[in-house]
Image (cartoon, rainbow, N blue to C red):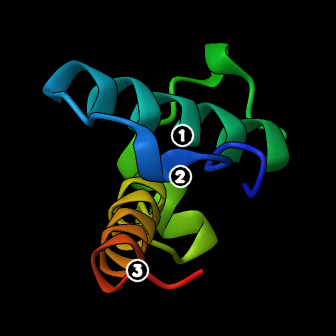
């Protein structure tokens, strides 16, 4: 997922953007688990199967907070 959050510190997260990121995260998880879109498996079931929660948006927000702290301190 690292390439997805590249330069995420400078993104403005809108409601539509968050929805798209979460949809892409689930799409990737389904590909990894080899779940065909015609299998009619809900996102909730996929997350239960891999025993994880959605984390991409939280990771982006965490990096944004770290970046703004870096900028405010003036670290090189």
Rendered location of residue 52, percent (x, y): 50, 74
Q: Which residue is mark 1?
A: 26
Residue at 38%, 54% in the rendered image: 57
Q: Quadrant of the C terminus?
A: bottom right
Query: Which numbered disc flags the more N-terminal residue, 1 or 2?
Result: 1
Q: Nearer the viewer, residue 70 or 35?
A: 70
Distance (Cα) linking label 1 and label 2: 8 Å
Distance (Cα) linking label 1 and label 3: 37 Å
Can you say whether 15 is above or below 76 in the image? above
Can you say whether 39 is above or below 44 in the image? above
Tag of residue 46: 2
Q: Nearer the viewer, mark 2 or mark 3?
A: 3
Q: Quadrant of the N terminus?
A: bottom right
| Quadrant assignment, res 73 | bottom left
Q: Nearer the viewer, mark 1 or mark 2?
A: 1
Crowding at mark 2 (Cα within 10 Å: few <14, some 14-19, many 20+)? some
Q: Secondary structure at mark 1?
A: helix
Q: Are marks 1 and 2 in contact (CB under 8 Å)?
A: yes
Rendered location of residue 69, percent (x, y): 31, 80
Q: Secondary structure at mark 3?
A: loop
Tag of residue 74: 3
Query: Which numbered disc flags the more N-terminal residue, 2 or 3?
Result: 2
Distance (Cα) linking label 2 and label 3: 42 Å
């Amino acid at each position: 997922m690292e390439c997805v959050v590249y330069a995420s510190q400078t993104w403005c997260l809108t409601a539509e953007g968050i929805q798209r990121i979460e949809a892409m995260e689930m799409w990737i998880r389904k590909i990894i688990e080899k779940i065909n879109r015609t299998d009619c498996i809900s996102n909730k079931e996929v997350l239960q199967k891999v025993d994880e929660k959605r984390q991409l948006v939280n990771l982006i927000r965490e990096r944004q907070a770290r970046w703004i702290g870096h900028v405010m301190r003036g670290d090189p």
